[in-house]
Amino acid sequence: MTITEVGKRYDLSPDTLRYYERIGLIPSVNRKKSGVRDYTEEDCRWVEFAKCMRQAGLSIEVLTEYLRLSRQGDGTVDTRKMLLIEQRKQLAVRIEELHKTLERLDGKIARYEQGLAQRQS
């Protein structure tokens, strides 16, 4: 699969995909003899993982550390698991904060709607 096809599949620009590869956020992608990147399904799973984790707020540093540990094999499984558990805890806190913000916005919107309804009466 070409970089353009992968970009369309995951809604990422080719520049972003090259950047992710350059900084180690995804493993190096094999290339055809012509030099064009040739993404495998395994490469795509890493792209999807990186995109998902970035959208969840994980830092590039955490993700590159995870990939580095992953390359080291089964001896790092416990470390990787702990890293993900810690990131999950942080995400849960963020979700709770966002939920509170959403409730506050809903309250404000409801007050505006009440005010508009009273003015129209």
Image: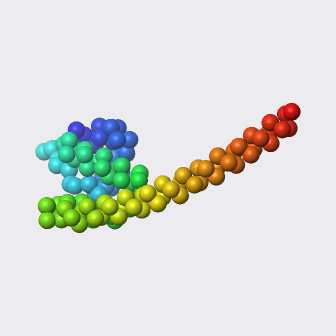
In this picture, residue 37 sits left or right of residue 84: left
In the image shown, does 92 or 67 lie closer to the viewer? 92
Q: Residue at x 17, y 47 (%)?
A: 31
Q: From the viewer's perspective, is residue 3 above or below residue 98?
A: above
Could you tell whether 19 is left or right of 90 in the image?
Answer: left
Furthest toward the top, the residue is 121
x 37%, y 45%: residue:
13
**Quarter assignment of residue 59:** bottom left
| Residue 116 at least partly seen | yes
Picture coordinates of residue 73, whole percent (x, y): 14, 61
Where residue 107 sits: x, y (%)? 68, 48
What is the number of callouts on the image? 0
Which is more toward the observer, 66 or 60? 66
Residue 34 location, x and y as percent? 16, 44
Q: In the rendered image, which quarter contains the N terminus?
A: top left
In the image, 47 versus 72, the foreground residue is: 72
Q: How is the image coloured?
A: rainbow
Residue located at (80% from left, 39% from top):
116
Q: Is residue 19 above or below residue 9?
A: below
Residue 25 image offset from top left, x and y in percent: 29, 57
Q: Residue at x 20, y 41 (%)?
A: 41
Residue 5 appears left or right of 115: left
Q: Choose between 22 and 106: the one closer to the eye.
A: 106
Q: Looking at the image, can residue 36 be seen?
A: no
The quarter of the image holding the C terminus is: top right
